[in-house]
Image (spheres, helix red, strand yellow):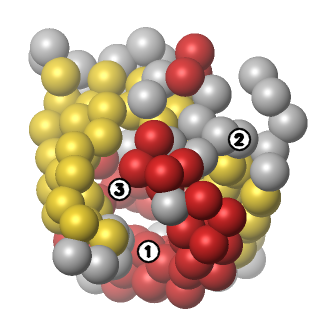
Amino acid sequence: MSEPIFSYEQSIEIAAPPAKVYALVSDMTRYGEWSPLNMGGKWVDGGTGKVGDWFEGHNRMGTMEYDAKVEITEAEDGKEFGFWTGGKAADIAHWSYSIKASGSGSTLTEHYRLHNPPRGMAKGGEAAVTAWTDSVPGNVAKMLEGIKRAAEV
C-alpha cells in the first residue's frame, strides 16, 4: 500500500448501542439512504459484508454517474467495518467506520484515506483531486448524520 495523499476522519455521538450502529454501517445496501454520493448498490456473488466480500455501489458526483466495486477488508461485529475502492490491491481509497461504546450509546468515526486517485479523477488532474478532497468533510458529515438518524429511531 502506498501512503495516503489525503486523510480525513470525523466522529458523531449516537444514542444507540454499538451493535445497532454496526448493523447499519455494515449494510452497504442502505448507503444510498444517507450518502450524498451513493445512490444504492448490491452485494456481488452472494456477499453479505464479510471480509473478502465485494459490493458494487452506484454513485453520482455532480452530473457524473458511475459504478464502483469495493472489497470488504474489515468486519468486526460492533467495532469496525471497512472497505477499499477497487479492492485492496488497487490501492485507491480506504473507507472505514470504527464504533466505540460511549455514555450516550456509541461514538461512530468515519475514516477516509485517498491513496491514488481513481482513473476519472486522475484525468482531471490536481484540480479534480482538490475539488474531491474539499468535498469530503461535508460528505462525511451528511453520511454520519444520516446513520445517526437511522440508528436513533
Tell me where residue 61 appears, x and y as whole percent. 32, 70
- Frontmost of labels 2 and 1 is 2
Residue 143 tag number: 1
Q: Is residue 12 visible?
A: no
Residue name at image x 35 percent, y 56 percent: 24
Q: Amino acid at mark 2?
A: His
Q: CA distance from mark 2 to mark 1?
A: 21 Å
Q: Nearer the viewer, residue 19 or 94?
A: 94
Disc 3 or disc 1, which is closer to the eye?
1
For residue 115, the mark is: 2
Which numbered disc, 2 or 1, marks the residue that appears first in the sequence?
2
Q: Residues within 10 Å of mark 2 (few under 14, many from 20)?
A: some
Helix, strand or loop at mark 3: helix
Q: Nearer the viewer, residue 46 or 87?
A: 87
Q: Is residue 72 above or below residue 89?
A: below
Locate residue 141, reporting x and y percent. Answer: 54, 83
Quarter the C terminus occupies = bottom left
* Side of 96 where 85 appears, left or right: left
The image quarter containing residue 46 is top left
Residue 24, numbered circle: 3
- At label 1, counting other C-alpha atoms closer than 10 Å, the crowd grade (few under 14, some 14-19, many 20 or more) is many
x 70%, y 50%: residue: 113
- Quarter of the rendering containing residue 1: top right
Identity, as a three-letter code, of the amino acid under mark 1: Met
